Image (spheres, helix red, strand yellow):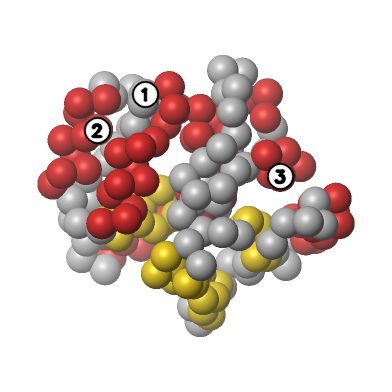
Amino acid sequence: MEKDKQDLENMNFQIVNIDITNERKNEIQQKFNIVDAIFVAGGNCFYLLQQLKEKDILKDLIEFANNKIYVGSSAGSCITCPSIEYAQKLDDKTQAPLLKDCSAMNLIDAFILPHYKSKEKYTRLADEIIKEYNNLNFLPLTNEQAIIVNNREDYKIVNTK
């Protein structure tokens, strides 16, 4: 997360930090109103989704993403999917004991698998997930790829290098 933040600052973006764990809902909403883009960093996608739901801010984030620019990295990209249930092999679901429902932002009609081919572990786990949930449309992404989403059904994978 710190490297991502530094990269954005190096590109002359002005950063407004949002700490969904420690800020109140109205503080987060005010920050949504003053920025043109949101970058949601990685971490545990179950914990991230739990915090968004606990703060009752998930709908606000979806509305933001539908009207402005949303950028997600790792867990921040996984939560754009219809659900994150598939990610249990990637992240420890027990880190989000209050999360009862894994439905997520539903911004894309596919399921993102980040860090594909970055480490043998991630590739192996992603391949296991694809095999286990063979009825889902997966998008395994390397660390040099991104998805540009126009709407749920209109998206494309691009190489960033």
Left or right of 48: which side holds 126? right
Q: Can you tell which of label 2 and label 3 is closer to the viewer?
A: 3
Q: Position of residue 152 (x, y in %)?
A: 48, 62
Q: Residues within 10 Å of mark 3 (few under 14, many from 20)?
A: many
Q: Amino acid at mark 2?
A: Ile
At x 69%, y 32%, the residue is 92
Q: Position of residue 125 (x, y in %)?
A: 80, 52
Q: Amino acid at mark 1?
A: Lys
Give the spatial CA distance, label 2 vs label 3: 28 Å
According to the image, label 3 marks what residue? Answer: 86
At x 34%, y 32%, the residue is 57
Q: Nearer the viewer, residue 6 or 44?
A: 44
- Where disc 2 sits, the SS reads helix
Q: Quadrant of residue 30?
A: top left
Left or right of 26: which side holds 107? right
Give the spatial CA distance, label 3 vs label 1: 23 Å
At x 43%, y 22%, the residue is 54
According to the image, label 2 marks what residue? Answer: 28
Q: Quadrant of residue 4?
A: bottom left
Q: Nearer the viewer, residue 41 or 68?
A: 68
- As drawn, the label of residue 55 is 1
Q: Position of residue 33 (x, y in %)?
A: 15, 44
- Where disc 3 sits, the SS reads helix
Vertical arrangement, residue 108 with respect to residue 21, above or below: below
Q: Amino acid at mark 3?
A: Tyr
Q: Residues within 10 Å of mark 1 (few under 14, many from 20)?
A: some
Give the spatial CA distance, label 2 vs label 1: 9 Å
